[in-house]
Image (cartoon, rainbow, N blue to C red):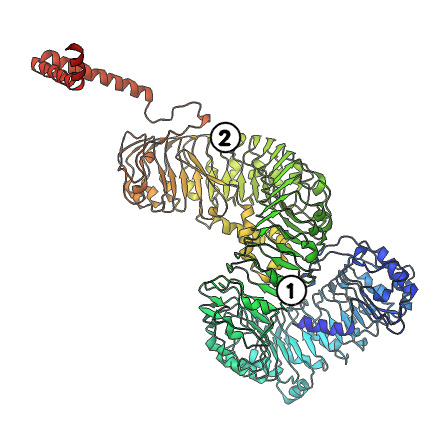
Amino acid sequence: MLNSRVVVLYAATIIVIIGHGSKAKACLEVEREALLKYKAFLKRPASLSSWINDSNSDCCGWERVTCDPDSGHVTHLSLQFLNGVYPHPDDFDPYNHQCLNFLTLDFSFFIPFKNLTTIDFSFNCFNNSIFTQDHGGMSTLKTLEAIDLSYCSFNISVIDTLTSFTSLKTLLLRNNFLDGPFPVRELLALRNLEHLDLSGNRLQSPSEIDDFKRMSELKNLETLDLSQNYLTINVTSIFRSLSPLKFLKNLLLSEYSMGTLGPLAIDELSVLQNLETLDLSKTSLTITSSSSTTLEYSKTLSRLMLETLDLSGTHIVNANTTFKFLSHLPNLRSLILHESGILFGEQDNEVFTDLPNLEVLILRSVSGTTVPIQGLCKMKNLQELDVSDNHLTGSLSSFSCLKNLTSLRALDLSRNFLSGNISLSFLAHNNAPLEYLSLADNNFEGTFPLSTLANYSDLKVLRLGRQQNKKFQVETENPPWIPSFQLQYLDMSSCQLNSATGTIPTFLSNQSSLIFIDLSNNNLLGRFPNWLLMNNPKLEALFLNNNLFNGYFEDQKMNIHLYTLDVSNNMIQGKLPTSLGFSFPYLEYLNASFNVLDGDIPASVGEMSTLRTLDLAYNNLSGELPNEMFKGCISLQILSLSHNKFQGQILAAPLSMTFLSVLMLDNNNFHGKLQDGLRNMQHLGLLDLSNNDLSGELPGWVVGNLNLVFLSVSGNNFEGAIPRELCELEFITFVSLSHNRFSGALPSCLGNSSSWLKFIHLRNNSLAGTIPESILNNSELFSLDLGDNNISGSVPNSVNGLTNLKYLSLAGNRLQGQLPKQICELKQLNFLDLSRNNFSGTIPTCFNNISFGNQGNYYDFLANYFRSSYFGFIYSQLLYINFQYHNFDVEMHDKVASYFAPEEMRITTKGSSLSYKGNILNNMSGLDLSCNQLEGKISQTIGDLVALHALNLSHNHLVGSIPDSFQKLKMIESLDLSFNRLSGQIPLQLQGLNSLAVFNVSYNNFSGRAPDEGQFATFGGNSYIGNPYLSWRISNRGTAMAPLPALATFNNGEDNSVIDFTSFCWTFAASYVMVVLVFIAILWINPYWRRKWFYFIEDCLYKCFGGVLKDVFY
């Protein structure tokens, strides 16, 4: 708010008119030629299309040029944004901006302009110094009064050159790279300065502290902005040094590094008699007050002209005393205390009553104490009140006294814990001049009919979004109503808007002045509202994501204001409009992911030169990527085209996207070898080409980008050795080369490549050799997946160096030897998969030292890492729009942390291998030692793994019984002990494992009766088959025998069944022969039973074949 007021002050002085000047008299030829020379000097002259070399073209009618209507002389030039690529000015970061190229600002081009008064060069990329052919020629620019060089990358040397402009009244050098001592002596050459802005630089205190006092020699100075510098001059000294400046009205010291240099007594303000605006925000000052409260101090303060005071980010020791002093400032109208650390006590409920003339009061995030609302209600003249983010509780009825504020224009109660229904009875009558109302991010419930706002005719901003209570709804259709207002800003995100019908608010069809619209996360139905774009020509940001809109995205009229458009997660179909790039030429953020769009990307996208983020992932788009996009989208930083049907070769031609930082082309149909298009992508941080049909060797230059953080080429047909350039990446965090045909040994340097390296996924290749110990020495590694390769040897004892490891898979290799006990030192593990190897010996008894999910789930761990990681920092800078309007943590938890998950976690049971991917890993932990040569008993300590979800010890040579401690595995979902030599009874205590869904003990030597209660009532005979002495109840799943699972080929043909099949056959045959011989002996010895047997046979033959025998013999 305060910055906007200062901008207005500057605007009053530096009036830059973009458009057509008066044509009362044509411009001078010498000035027209000078402008054409400057256009030719620029690297991007296309932005000055009206500047043409035609003698009939009047330069006074050119864009960015303003002339004096009487003389025809050029008086104003607006030359900003002509040589640089930047984000939206509101989000500009001076130390993280990008430049296409640098130029030397040469003032010799402007010597012909005798009457030039104002020139704006802001937001360009110039060298660190200004060069001119004729330095003395600058003295001819005697009329130049205002120059703006903000955001231009200049260093301190620019000040020396500017000293020749003695007529300057306004000098703006905001956000450059000015460093070194404060240039007091150089600035004194500009005696006429009235407005000086040096904010956002790196200026330090003068070499001699007394030098700063000479600033008082700039007698005409009205505005001085020293915010965001490294000055260490005591703020009290600054006040006293500037006190002789009788015309000084605006002093801005925001984020001025002086917080450790002692407190500021509030009465020190008295030395600046004419000051109207003072900004001390974010200075970490401690605000105190003098012990004196004499009448003399009161009279001194009463003579001050101060109107606006910003103490945000300071610490006010005594609220009551401080506000007593402020009450003596008769002109004080605006008081800003955002994050001021002020502590209100119960006795401070009347603290604001001494400020009856205050019109603007900002108390956002002031402290953890209760804001004295009742005292605020007595400030009759209050027009703007912000008490957001203060942990306020209760219902709106507790704010009923606010209805006394009949002049209230803006009220912000957002980001609190307010509950109950929304009732506007706490506000003044409907005819109050309310313009701004924010109740977002609270805990309201019930249904809020928007019709209650119908008569607030001045309403321009309405924010109701993101209520924590899912019972909150906004109804806009019932009862019918017609609004008397014209909104500019509307936020109703996550409001269950018209939940009964899913209808988009019809009152919006009457709104034509909207600048910002957020209707996201509401499950709205119906056709995509193209009319929202048509009806609001000044729209800048539109969020319709996470709804259920269908239909088509139609061609639109040109909107030069729109810079953010998010329609993701809907059901929009059809093709993208062919005129997309022409309709929104200045769009910076476009997200249409998770729809059902088809067809090609229109070539007009190449016209969007300011586009920074393009996300079209998860659609049905096809065809080849248009060359126009790669040539024209020169500002693009994020390109996400994942999960479509694009085809062709990837980036065959070099790109013009110099600043591309995130490229996601995974899960498409791209084929062929990688071309050179990515070779010069110096800013590339994330590259995902996984799940395509790419082939050939992986070029070293792909992984040779020193800024690369995330690399995934899994699921392709790459072959050859892993490039050693991968080891040279300083910031690499994630590497996934899984599911390819890479061969050779693992690079021994991989573990030492980067201290940032956390994830190595190389599953399902043809890698051979042993495990390099260098990889095992990386204590920062989170996930290591070397499964399904040809790695041999044993697991080195140095595996205990992976102290932070969460996921380890060495499955499907040729590893042998005993399991090292050092594995037990990996206490952070969630998943351990050593299956399908040739490990022997016993299972270590120390596995209970491993957490297996008992120390937080995997995804939360990833999300926490992401927030603090280098990659998180880079990605957050790119997705600036999410910070401004949305909850970044929520979006990134799902969208980015999932990239870091392992490719899959396999649980093998009952002969089937189940793969788990994505969010399900959030609730999984597992131990898989199956298909090895392990022997001995199962340790009781395995039962101590109480957080384990899956345990597979099948296909080994384990003996003994199932430990009773298994009853403690309350989280277990899958337990497979099949194909071993276990014996005894199955413990009945296992019936208490209520989460158990898969249980397999087939082909062992168990005896007795299997448990049949709880989850065991659902297990069929396939869970117990191959245990000849075990019986079980027939469950609802039946007892049909399942096909015998094929044994692993690496078991060398060993018979893994519990009872030797050959012995069983010989025993069965001998028993059968013995029974027959005993029966014959009985018939031979006893005539009675012999006759009975013959009569029985005769009777059976007669009954079965009597009719046939009669026909034959009779």
**Secondary structure category for the residue under label 1:** loop
Q: Where the C terminus falls, by quadrant?
A: top left
Which of 828 and 1024 lies nearest the eye of the viewer? 1024
| Quarter-of-image position of residue 354 | bottom right
The location of residue 446, given as percent across then percent down, is 44, 68
Residue at the far left in the pictured view: 1088
The residue located at (62%, 32%) in the rendering is 719
Q: Amino acid at mark 2?
A: Leu
Residue 392 vs residue 1064: left or right? Answer: right
Q: Which residue is mark 2?
A: 815
**Is residue 934 at all visible to an observer of this figure?**
yes
Q: Mark 2 packing: few (<14 Cα in 10 Å), some, or many (20+)? A: many
Q: Where the N terminus falls, by quadrant?
A: bottom right
**Secondary structure category for the residue under label 2:** strand
Q: Mark 1 packing: few (<14 Cα in 10 Å), some, or many (20+)? A: many
Q: Amino acid at mark 1?
A: Leu
How far apart in space, not on screen, are marks 1 and 2 (Cα)?
Answer: 63 Å
Residue 957 vs residue 248: left or right? Answer: left
Mark nearer the N terminus (1 vs 2)? 1
**Is residue 136 at all visible to an observer of this figure?**
no
Which of 235 and 899 lies nearest the eye of the viewer? 899
Numbered badge on residue 539: 1
